[in-house]
Amino acid sequence: MTGIVLWEDSKSAKSWVTLEFEYMLYNEVCKEKDVFDWTPVENLLNSVASRRHQAVIRFRYTYPGYSCAVPDYIKNWPGYEATNGKSEGRNTEFPDWRCEELQRFHKEFHRRFAEKYDSDPRLAFLETGFGLWAEYHIYSGPFKLGRTFPSKEFQADFLSSMDNWFTHTPWMISIDAADDTYSPFVSNRELLKLNFGNFDDSFMCEDHDGYNYESWAFFGKDRYQKAPLGGEFSYYTDSDQRHCLDPGGMHGRVFEDEAKKFHMTFIIGADQPKYQSDSRLTEAGMSMGYRFKVKDFRVIDGEAVLLVENTGVAPIYRDAFMAVNGARSKYNLRKLMPGESHWMKVSATGISASSCEVSVECDHLVPGQKGIEFDAFID
């Protein structure tokens, strides 16, 4: 549930890959009112799980050069009128957010998605949003709040509902939602209390210390404590992709330092196998997310006592437990923040100083997926 992420269609079996990303379309799942066929989602999740990985999914309506992924029945709804315009120089269709049926569908879709997949181990994280690529902007194209982009009132209602529907699966929105042009967060600070994470689609770009940093900071420097932070390496220039993981860094910044600074859990790096070795990708991937270290282990009166530290840059976002001989500690490692240590006890049969099997157990793993590893330096 951490590291460098490849696209699902790469079908990668690389040892450094644990997550795969894919866009999905709303009209793949729904073609008639209140009729939802989750087969495309099932096919994707099964494909990812067959490689012992987990999925990061983002549903979108709008993509430059394509028709809008609004279900056909809504496109034929009385009064619905899509907007056609140029985006990045290509003919692009934008949804009509004036349509109350589109608004109702959007909420119903996510409610039903949560009902079906909120606890599914094949799904790691869900990204959501509006505009181009669901990245919370229409920087190129006919932007009109309330029409080609949903109203701030609807957004507030939808985001609040998401927080109620998704109680297990972490969900995330783009850092571009910090822009008052598009989102309601500036005018409605109560929304910042919602339990969403953030993603940044231009990580490591040259001016990252400006707009990107300010957008991250807007959502709170401690947001990582309750939800994951991720993103994608910048595509602003070919050089960004080619050099973002150079050991010596790029634009005066080294990736590992940035991953720690922003408490990153994952980042999409689909092109990176063309530029970096497997060993470098492993190294960079392991600089993100949680990392557990058993600093002390003792057996006292037949009971195991462990001191565990999170030496990573973020917490784990699923329930996980230290276990000895198959018996779990009551302490949830999800609570362990970066740099924190915690003593925990485990009572189990057969515990002795000379014979113990220590593990990290998590129920949110797909069949055959290797268990969670940990560091241990014990005399």
Image (tube, rainbow, N blue to C red):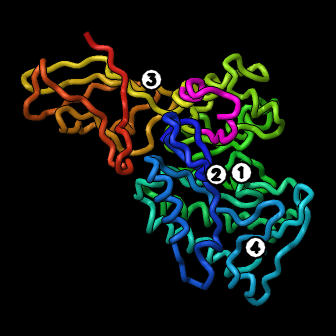
Q: Give whichever of discs 3 and 4 has the lower sequence position.
A: 4
Q: Is residue 151 left or right of residue 128?
A: right
Residue on which disc 3 sits: 311
Q: Give whichever of discs 2 and 4 has the lower sequence position.
A: 4
Mark 2 → mark 4, Cα distance in angstroms = 19 Å
Question: Is the residue under label 1 in contact with that under label 3 (CB below 8 Å)?
Answer: no
Q: Which residues are magenta?
A: 267-282
Q: Position of residue 156 (x, y in %)?
A: 64, 62
* Residue 139 versus residue 237 in the image, above or below: below
Report crowding for label 3: few under 14, some 14 to 19, many 20 or more residues within 10 A (C-alpha): many
Question: Is the residue under label 1 in contact with that under label 4 (CB below 8 Å)?
Answer: no
Kind of residue at disc 3: Thr
Kind of residue at disc 2: Ile
Which residue is more in the foreground, 160 or 37?
A: 37
* Residue 340 versus residue 73 in the image, above or below: above
Report crowding for label 2: few under 14, some 14 to 19, many 20 or more residues within 10 A (C-alpha): many
Kind of residue at disc 1: Ala
Mark 3 → mark 1, Cα distance in angstroms = 30 Å
Which residue is pictured at 70% across the width and 74% down the height? 70
Question: Is the residue under label 4 in contact with that under label 2 (CB below 8 Å)?
Answer: no
Residue on which disc 1 sits: 177
Q: Is residue 63 visible?
A: yes
Mark 4 → mark 1, Cα distance in angstroms = 17 Å
Report crowding for label 1: few under 14, some 14 to 19, many 20 or more residues within 10 A (C-alpha): many
Mark 1 → mark 2, Cα distance in angstroms = 7 Å
Which of labels 3 and 1 is toward the front?
3
Question: Is the residue under label 3 in contact with that under label 2 (CB below 8 Å)?
Answer: no
Task: Give me the disc on residue 173.
Answer: 2
Task: Give me the disc on residue 327.
Answer: none
Q: Give whichever of discs 4 and 1 has the lower sequence position.
A: 4
